Image (tube, rainbow, N blue to C red):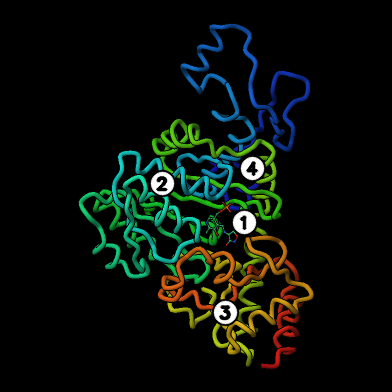
Amino acid sequence: MTQKSLGKATQAIHAGEARTSSADKTGVPLLPPIYQNSTFRFATAAECAEAFRDEESGYVYTRWGNPTQEVLEQKLAVLEAGEAALATASGMGAVSTALLTALADGGHVVAMENLYSATFQILNEELPRFGIETTFVDATDPTQIERAIRVDTKVLYLESPTNPLLKLVDLQAAAEIAKARGLTSIIDNTFATPCGQQPIIFGIDVVVHSMTKYMSGSGAVIAGAIIGKKEFIVSAKEGALRNFGAVISPFNAWLTLHGLTTLPLRFTRHSENATHVATFLEAHPAVAWVRHPSLTNHPQHELAKRQMDAFGGMITLELKGGRAAGEHLVDHLQLCSLAVSLGDVRTLICHPASTTHSHVPADIRRRTGITDGLVRISIGLEDAEDIAADLGQALESYTP
Ligand code: LCS
């Protein structure tokens, strides 16, 4: 049995975890232990020098590597069908480390115009200060990607589904363009998780995650991940991650490791619940429109069916009453929580224009469709009927 041939539920539980018995009498703990330490002791100078020379020969210092991080990284590589993985301190730690690695010699970036706002800020504000420019395009249309590529373009940066509009990128078409033009393609797979889609199978080079969300699932940690070819991961680990220092703590690695064991089950339930609630909202008279990849009115529903295994737990909607109705909705919830973040067991609801995407300039928000009346819901694992009933009672109590 190879780990790659196993089903996702089995991989999520067993991949990367030890089975063989160790020499000491504790045997192999069923749950991988937390190595909550910053440094490792050596018996001799020669042993220590060897560990510095050949990192495979032993652990030195937790910013360089730690056994708990590495169990998590092996599980991540198997789940995302990549050669290797790195766990990072946050999703932004993963995004910045991946970009700094792919842009080590400078260059130009072509990026999706609708991105998580801190990623947009890295590309639009931080990297230009170091001479790295980005052209933003509507990457739902592959010809726009093609047209924006310059001779010095090094990276194609994508999200799919996007935060918060749930726009999709044709992964295979984008990967083919990047390959043909010699670019490193990077995708943020936070909304889909490997249970929703595995971009590497479509030819994408590098996957990044905010594991703060579905991957850990509990809302207890801030964490991130990078998955890709061994050469890229080693270069990120020995360069940008180690030196800029966005390293995950052993405790957060351990919490994420255990969160991942239930990801396939949770993601199936998040997806089913979201379809139920989206269908309820679509029929509600107070709702102008609702978007979820499972709905036939999603402009890219056919693409979603082709490249996604599950549609995920995120819904966006606009109320007929606009921003005032949206504010009334979030103020009158009894079960769902007004909170940013997503992928939690609890249903979380937020207003992107004033929160998660408030740092994106208003003209770009309007052009990309993040209207002032937009509401984003991260559907949790409660009973779907209870989530719908809570939203229903808040919608029905609104009078313009
Ligand atoms: N990528 C995506 C798609 C995200 O949604 C987020 C955070 C990040 C990266 C950054 O991850 P972090 O460093 O926070 O682990 N998204 C958030 C959101 O929509 N609300 O609060 C945080």
Residue depicted at 54% across the width and 71% down the height: 353
Amino acid on which the number 1 mark rests in the picture: Lys
| Amino acid type, residue under disc 2 in the picture | Leu
Q: Along the line of sight, which residue is nearer the eye, 301 or 400?
A: 400
Q: Is residue 170 left or right of residue 46?
A: left
Picture layout, residue 223 above or below residue 354: above
Q: Which residue is drawn at 66% across and 35% down?
A: 250
Q: Residue 14 carries which label?
A: 4
Q: Which of marks 2 and 3 is nearer the N terminus?
A: 2
- Earlier sequence position, callout 4 versus callout 1: 4
Which residue lies under the disc numbered 1?
Answer: 213
Image quadrant containing the C terminus: bottom right
For the residue with label 1, is its CB less than 8 Å from the closest atom of ligand 1? yes
Q: Which quarter of the rendered picture does the N terminus lie within?
A: top right
Q: How crowded is mark 4: few (under 14 residues within 10 Å), some or many (20 or more)?
A: some
**Residue 4 position (above or below residue 22):** below
Q: Do the residues labelled 3 and 4 touch (CB within 8 Å)?
A: no
Q: Is mark 3 on a helix, strand or loop?
A: strand
